Image (spheres, helix red, strand yellow):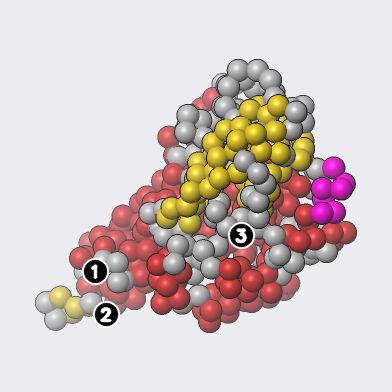
Amino acid sequence: MDFDFTEDQEALRDAVRRFVDKDYDFERRKAIVRAGGFDRGVWDGLAGLGLTALAVPESHGGLGFGAVEAMVVMEELGRGLVMEPIAQGALIAPALLAQAPQALQSDWLPRIAGGEALVVLAHQEAKSRYHLNRVATRAVDGRLTGVKSLVPAGDVADAFIVPARVSGADDAAEGVALYLVERASAGVHTRAYSLHDGSRAAEVHFENAAGQLIAGPDAGLALLELAADIGIAAQAAEAVGVMEKFLALTTEYMNTRKQFGVAISSFQALRHRAADVKMQLELARSMSYYATLRLGDAPAVRRRALSQAKVQLGQAMRFVGQQCTQLHGGIGVTDEYIGSHYFKRLTVMEMQWGDTLHHLGEVSARMQDTAGVFA
């Protein structure tokens, strides 16, 4: 199998890397964190690169690129610790809205492609515990009532894609529909806060808020599962970028930090630890490729593959984050040093879209008929 990237994909990678290196250095990122974790100017810059149009169909003014191009972009954004929600606004939202009625597509997809509208998925609830079918938010005659948590950039987004239950118990597998709700609509209230890594999120309250139907209960949960899998694949690629850069910082530090008159990179025990980190990074990279290439498979196969990827990525993120921080010593946990922010980002990502333990259970549940080792 050929894992080489095309010239166009490499050109896309170079363009994103140049933007990150030039316009998203550590000082600017710290200023964005102090301002709340989201910068409209950065979002406009990403739109200027065409990233908001990445997954939007060409018929609606987008580029119509595929999952591999998205993976390339997310790796580079991970290297730079970019906090703006490209995965949510440029990958997940277009994939869901592409299944909406034509009028809704025509209204929102061109604006998403141009960076004029930020639409994010608002699906997490306090009692859902990563289970996508546990939806307590209710929809009656197109009006939604409920609370969604940890919504990315929720107080600055223009609209939300909201799973809401139209029938059944809160944990039923059927009865979940998807709606688009504008933030400016009556009955929508947001409360913003910063996450541990400095990114911006919000609690979003819906009180009899008007929504536009994207998908009914016959397809709502299946589309929500697709959205989660796209999110996992994007996050896997981002994590590879984060870990790769963190390892490079650690290697540079080990080559310059001296103890007993020599660089600590000459100590065999530390070299072995660095080698273990590199091995985990490459395992994560291979599973990121696997996750991306499985996005087009049948839902049952895709769901299992993405859970497998999240298990491996979760283990790698924790190991790489902890080892690289420890190899730095005391400076590795100081807020003034960029390395600590890579560690924070890895820590937060491990908990998003389902933590490692949750996805280990998902993998186990989908391996009832095989030993799993060779499946």
Camera-near label (1 vs 2) is 1
Q: Mark 3 points at which residue?
A: 86
Q: Which of marks 3 and 1 is nearer the N terminus?
A: 3
**226 or 255: nearer the viewer:** 226
**How far separated are the C-alphas under marks 3 and 1?**
30 Å
Identify the mark nearer the N-term, 3 or 2: 3
Residue 305 in sight from this viewpoint:
no
3 and 2 marks in contact (CB < 8 Å): no
For label 1, count other residues whose C-alpha is less than 10 Å away and answer few (under 14), some (14-19) or many (20+).
some
| Mark pair 3, 2: CA separation | 35 Å
Image quadrant where one finds the N terminus = bottom right
Please report the residue visible at 34 percent of the width from the left and 76 percent of the height from the top.
252
- Give the amino acid at mark 3: Ile
Disc 1 is placed on an element classified as helix
The amino acid marked with disc number 1 is Ile
Name the disc covering residue 253, or none.
Answer: none
Q: What stretch is highlighted in magenta?
A: 101-107
Q: Is residue 339 left or right of residue 372?
A: left
> Left or right: where does residue 326 sit relative to residue 117?
left
Q: Earlier in the sequence, mark 1 or mark 2?
A: 2
Q: For the residue marked with disc 2, what is the amino acid?
A: Thr
Q: Residue at x 45, y 40 (%)?
A: 355
**Percent coordinates x, y for residue 161 in the rendering:** 67, 44
Q: How crowded is mark 3: few (under 14 residues within 10 Å), some or many (20 or more)?
A: many
Nearest the eye: 190 or 104: 190
Residue carrying label 2: 256
Q: Name the residue under label 1.
A: 331
- Specify whether residue 362 is painted magenta: no
Q: In this view, does 282 lie to the left or right of 18?
A: left
Q: Distance between the residues labelled 1 and 2?
A: 14 Å
